[in-house]
Amino acid sequence: MTTYKICLLPGDGIGPEIIAEGTKVLDAVGARYDVSFEYETALIGGAAIDACGMALPEETLETAKACDAVLLAAVGGPKWDTTDPEKPRPEQGLLGIRKGLGLYTNLRPVQIFNALADASTLKPEVIDGVDLMIVRELTGGLYFGMRERFYDEEGAGTGGAKGQRAYDTLEYSEYEIERIARQAFEIARKRRSKVTSVDKANVLETSRLWREIVHRIHDAEYADVELEDLLVDNTAMQLIDRPADFDVMVTENMFGDILSDEAAQITGSLGMLASASLGDGTALYEPSHGSAPDIAGRGIANPLAQIMSVEMMLRYSFDMGEAADDIRRAIVATLDEGWRTGDIRSTDTPDDKVVGTAAMGDLIVERL
Ligand code: IPM
Ligand code: MG
């Protein structure tokens, strides 16, 4: 029997509740496919700050590196919210582990579940057929550039007005753009062979470099794939105007962060968006949503994005495509039967079809 070691990072808020449904589904899949999943839980985010004063303890990174895959739930919460640059923030845990594991490719699939079509704020004819993959660069750009906050004694550049100043830097190297572009083209070849590269080349130098390199890689290695360039502001508009036209969308870290929340809303709920973060070693799987501190501990959070991250783990880390398809079918069946968590219920969902986190996990397992 094959044994896989999974590093579990429950994190904060609803994290512990939803990750339990992820492992419930993994265990059920393991039993069917004669694979055993062993878990090692480690600290990250606010939970780690409380326990040891930092968002990503060295031990957590070591545990993650030693495992075959990482399943993360969510980090953050009002308890650790601060604008003080000296204080640790839960998000540093997430950014640290992405960087520490070299996870430069973030995949965020946006798909419509027919049963949830009415959960979208967009018209049914607009969202019909939406199936896009956001490929977000995850270890470069504004998130990891030089930054500083300081007191400006001179008031340089502000006509002598003294006060605090701050900057963040957006930087990309040719190598970083090349490898993410290749990932996007490879994925497109397995889908509908179309890549939309999103940038702000009318203003930013990094974007002009981005565009040049994406085209060079395309022309030399992937001329069979259709490539279009789109400015990020225009993309934000086109995404809600013609979402079904997109196949693969590749973009830098922060543009991808923003556009993936927007794209998730096309499906009606951020609670339905999973993600995979891949590099050259251990990969990490997590829902794209946050820790929802407002509903934490109440057993009502939607575990489906977490369960879909398990689906992605099976596909990308363990080559268990069939098991991943089983999970997808179970989710579709559960939704088709009308079962909903609160975030995806509609006005005509009967009360007795609204279930909590654990019950939703059970429904999926029963239908596997
Ligand atoms: C995401 C989140 C994170 C990000 C935060 C929590 C740091 O918004 O995964 O999209 O900005 O990458
Ligand atoms: Mg985000």
Image (cartoon, rainbow, N blue to C red):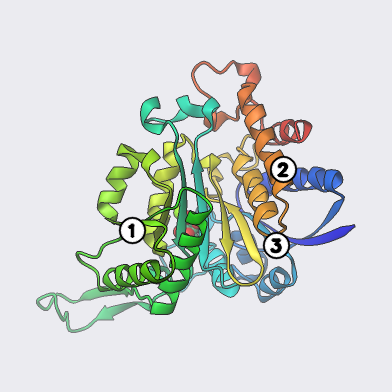
In the image, what residue occupies the spot 31% across and 48% down? Answer: 236
Crowd rating for badge 1 (residues with CA inside 10 Å; few <14, some 14–19, many 20+): many
Indicate which label's residue lies in the foreground, 1 or 2. 1
Indicate which label's residue lies in the foreground, 2 or 3. 3
Q: Earlier in the sequence, mark 3 or mark 1?
A: 3
* Nearer to me, 2 or 162: 2
Instruction: Check disc 3 and report its element: helix, strand or loop.
Output: strand
Instruction: Check disc 2 and report its element: helix, strand or loop.
Output: helix
Task: Look at the image and tell me in which quarter the N terminus lies.
Answer: bottom right
In the image, what residue occupies the spot 30% across and 50% down? Answer: 235
Q: Is residue 367 left or right of residue 133?
A: right
Q: Which residue is mark 1?
A: 198
Q: Is residue 96 above or below residue 368?
A: below
Can residue 185 be seen here? The reply is yes
Q: Which residue is mark 3?
A: 69
Indicate which label's residue lies in the foreground, 3 or 1. 1
Q: Earlier in the sequence, mark 2 or mark 3?
A: 2
Q: Is residue 158 left or right of residue 254?
A: left
Question: Does the beta carbon of the residue at mark 3 sit less than 8 Å from ligand 1?
Answer: no
Residue at far bottom of view: 154
Residue at far right of view: 1
Question: Does the beta carbon of the residue at mark 1 sit less than 8 Å from ligand 2?
Answer: no
